[in-house]
Amino acid sequence: MADTLDDQSWAMNHERCNMARQGKVELWWVQCEDHSHTGEVYILAGDRYGRRLGKTVNKEYAEFDFMADSVVDEVLEIANMMGMEQEYPARSDCIESLLRTICDPAPSGQRYDFLFKVSCPSCSSLKIRYAPYDPPRFKIIDMPLATHVNWDNLTQEAKTQLVFDTLKRVGCLKN
């Protein structure tokens, strides 16, 4: 079994990662307060409870479903044993950072970002205003389910080390 997550091994999982699957998203408008740029962002449409939309810098999308994915319990058990932050919203950010680490990369090799941090589509400024259109606008996009084949192939020791390293890097371990 592998002892590390290899970002390049996405190629052997490419077909599974890219299984034709589409999902419905709601379009929200965005306006940059620094430079008045305008644009749109995607938000999962419908019941979003337990679901996250991941996006890469190349605008590749994948959905992660907390309620249906068996890896969640395994990762949280390891993280909680290590003393992961328990207070909201910090805990939520920690979990989303773990998702970025354990999920397989997108076809481009980039990692999905599951943190919902809306930024200006032109200059990446976080000083923005955003909201849903009125009336709402929807779009169907390619959105495979996020996979974690690389994670599944790690030894228990490697999984524990990966969770520890991730939590430490993003400041999610209690002192």
Image: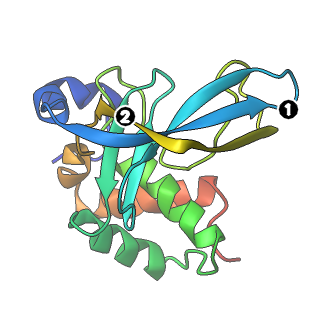
In the image shown, does 138 or 51 lie closer to the viewer? Answer: 138
Residue 105's label in the rendered image is none
Cα distance in 3D space between marks 1 and 2 = 26 Å
Q: Which residue is mark 2?
A: 61
Quarter of the image for residue 46 reads: bottom left
Question: x, y percentage for residue 11?
Answer: 20, 23
**Looking at the picture, how far across and down is residue 150, in whole percent?**
23, 44
Q: Amino acid at mark 1?
A: Glu
| Disc 1 crowd, CA 10 A, few/some/many (<14, 14-19, 20+) | some
- Secondary structure under badge 1? loop
Discs 1, 2 touching: Cβ within 8 Å: no
Where 167 sits versus 127, above or below? below
Comparing marks 1 and 2, which lies closer to the viewer? 1
- Which quadrant of the view contains residue 93? bottom right
Q: Nearer the viewer, residue 133 or 100?
A: 133
Residue 165 visible to the viewer: no
Is residue 131 rendered to the left or right of residue 141? right
Q: Is residue 119 left or right of residue 134?
A: right
Q: How is the image coloured?
A: rainbow
Q: Is residue 167 above or below residue 113?
A: below
Residue behind mark 1: 33
Count neighbours of disc 2 (C-alpha within 10 A) and say few if under 14, some if 14 to 19, many if 20 or more. Answer: many
Three-letter amino acid code of the residue under disc 2: Tyr
